[in-house]
Amino acid sequence: MDSETTGDQIGADMDEPPKFGLKLMLNHEFPLKSKQLIIPRPKQIFEMMPLSARYFKYYLAKKIQKRRPIMDYVHMISAQRMYGCPIGGIGGGTIGRGFKGEFCRFQLYPGLYEYVTVPECQFIVNIRDANKETIFQSVLSTYNKPKKAPQSWEWNINGSDCEYTALYPRAWTTYDLTKYGIKLVCRQITPVIPHNYKDSSLPCAVFVFTAKNVSNEHRDVSITFTWTEVLGEPNKKKNIGKLDLERYAEELTCGVTLEQKIADQPCTFTIAKKKHENETIHEAYCLWNSAKTSGYVWECLKKHGKLEPDPNQSAKVTENKNEKEKSKKIYKNDSIALSSTISLDPGGCSSTEFCLVWDMPIIKYKDSKIHKRYYTKYFGSDGIAGASIAAYALRNYGNWEKQLAEWQDPILNNSNIPDWLKSALMNELYFIADGGTIWFDVSDEFPETDPRHEFGVFGYLEGHEYRMYNTYDVHFYASFALAQLWPNLQVVLQYMYRDSIALESTKLRQSLYDGKSCKFKVKDTVPHDLGDPDGLPFTQINAYNIHDVSEWRDLNLKFILQAMRDYRLLRAHSAPFGNERSSEVVEECGERIETREPAVAVWDSRQYLTELYPACAALLRRGVEWDRDGDGLIENGGFPDQTYDAWVMTGPSAYCGGLWVAAVSAVHQMARILGLEEDEREFSKMLEQARSSFENKLWNGTFYRFDTKPSNRDVVMADQLAGHWFLRSSGWTDHVFPEENVKKALHTIYENNVMRFLNGRMGAVNGFVRGTRGHVDTTALQSEEVWTGVTYGLAAVMIYEGMHEQAFVTAGGLYNTLMKMGLAFETPEALYENGNHRSVAYMRPLAIWSMYQAILARPCPPAPVNNGQPHHAKENNL
């Protein structure tokens, strides 16, 4: 992964935007409106009144403590409907980009988002003719000029002449400046690369600008990158910009750095470029004050076509007396800028590259323990790695793009995958890095026999608004992305949870749902989450405080099912990036496994299963306590005791009962694989009884009943086959659930939850009451929601069962609507029939990668170009 390929070696084809991806003109207006506005029905309001009263008491206590609630239902964030592909690797902080050119949505301190747009962080283009006269100059953005933007700066780009394409982790913006003799393309690259753990962790992005002269005269095209202090606290002393000449000279790059503090943590921004052969390291930079000298930057570019140090600042320059620091000059400014010029004869084409790095290597929580981000394993934690990372990025981005192409091209060229899904698969991956993600190096805390020694500890939020790390009931759906693309991070996450299972806490707290006191953690239970980013993540677990999660029926079972699914994927040693390898299909204990040549370093599957099995067995045995009547099937407790935490299940239920049957089957297979005969006999008996009770109590001839309450007898739940979904994802060939019943249930869901709900234009509604006058189930707020991740998981089950057309209509209708609403790169947890949404930028939609896994296992005939679902956001018809 360390071999170096320069940008010049990768060819001009990289500048051409791909066929697939989110495509928007820079003056695009989204045809459908959507906002976060939750309006409960009167019955729902009455039922939630006690919970609401306790929540407001909790909320006020947090405000008094000057801390943020883990879920803020008072100041909810509506989707901004502006985002393109964010920048930044996994676990090093991220910066959002608007498709119109903004730098926005900063997440630099882990897990805490600031929804701001900083107009001084920009690219500026200057075009000069053969007489060295400026004929065009503009900020390279088309969003409305903010009131606080530098007054002299001009936004002159015509959005109708420019197009944006996002195919994560890259983006392209084409600027048609033919009127001035130039066509310009900006290519944005972030190294989020499957199976490449080092480069995927880097807090950086590369921007490659390619200009072509389409006139009959010479043209000089100057690109300037400006940056300023971001997220600065009021009434704090401004920071210092500095030029580090010595380091950049050695790396054949030059750049400027800006040091500041964010949430009291040191952070250094570096903007750098490749140094041209005849360019000195003293040229084309500027240190400026955003409040006082922004006008100089604009006028300097207009006059000279590039930056020059402000002569009015010369009196403020001081040189260090230390001999080793003679090459460093200190300027009292809060902003930095760097420019690069491309000279083009008629017909000529050339490029220039910039890199942005933010080096915030150390995170200190309230325990004062030093946590080192994962990239410090390779670049150090002393806070001066910006220049080194920038030089490394500018040398290697060509190699990154080759690796991305090797991974993406087989997917993009797969005729079994509809076009919209190719775009969705890539772009939903933004949440792996931009999910408030933390990734720490802990190599000195674990032995080499533990995966955390090599791959650290990892966490991502349930959502930007629901600030809990690795929320496990939701990660169950999202885990397909990690398990397939960064499997060692999925392994690490499972080990982190394994170590928490045996913990018991004596500390009590109040459950907001019913007001009862409960322990923070009970032995032999899987915690809901691994902490709050505003607290002590990975130490203070179970930040979620609405329910007593030790009584949740799904958490323990989801750990078991993920362990089995992960074993299957690790065992397969799938070749990365879709490469063809010699393969052999084998049957192992009723499990279909395709073995291939080991192609990437993944954790040993046998060791993984061996070390997780004791926890799996303990969790299953603990779950027997929920089988109140001894029929082999667990019962729900009559409160929201699973991931649908506002939707009550009572007695046996399709959702939790199906997960139980699947988990018993999984542990039974684990025991057989590991040769544990006594356990195998124990769980074989449990499985036989559980299967029988599940079918007898819940199958009604056309679908599995939501639960056994008479009032719910006609409620069709979209997620009723979650257990079967994971068994199919684990390569199961045994029909734990009768094949005929599964297919009948899927057809019932499709006919009711999908097609009778907005004619399939918004995916599958969670609950639907069937009948001649069928309607959405309004029992609970969540029963009438569409959950994006659940819809994608349902579509995966349909694919496994050969229902490809129905799967693509179900998931494609939802994706198409999300794009029309402008919800790319902030995919919400839920949509409502009226077009409103809940909880922006959520983890669960990563379940779309289960569809890809299903397609690989069960290919279909070549799909039509768009299979009825346009992937291009300029399509306006629902």
Image: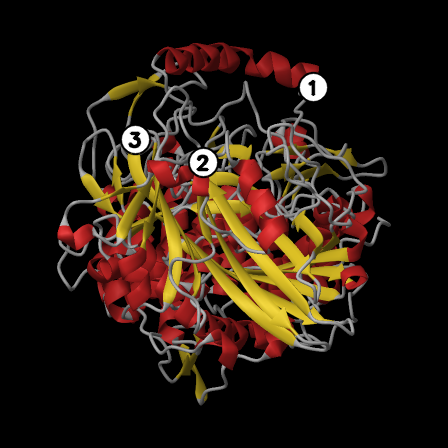
Where disc 2 sits, the SS reads loop
Instruction: Provide residue 354's location: percent of width, then percent of height.
Output: 48, 60
The mark lying in front, picked from 1 and 2, is: 2
Residue labelled with disc 3:
264
Where disc 1 sits, the SS reads loop
Q: Is residue 361 left or right of residue 191?
A: left
Residue in view at x 70 percent, y 71 percent: 218
Instruction: Provide residue 628's location: percent of width, then percent of height.
Output: 39, 34
Quadrant hosting residue 176: bottom right
Residue in view at x 61 percent, y 32 percent: 782
Residue labelled with disc 2:
230
Instruction: Tell me the amino acid under the disc marked 2.
Output: Val
Residue 610 shows in the view: yes
> Compared to 118, does 92 lie above or below?
below
Q: What is the spatial separation of the Cα atoms under label 3 and label 2, in whole angstroms?
A: 13 Å
Q: What is the spatial separation of the Cα atoms under label 1 and label 2, in whole angstroms?
A: 42 Å
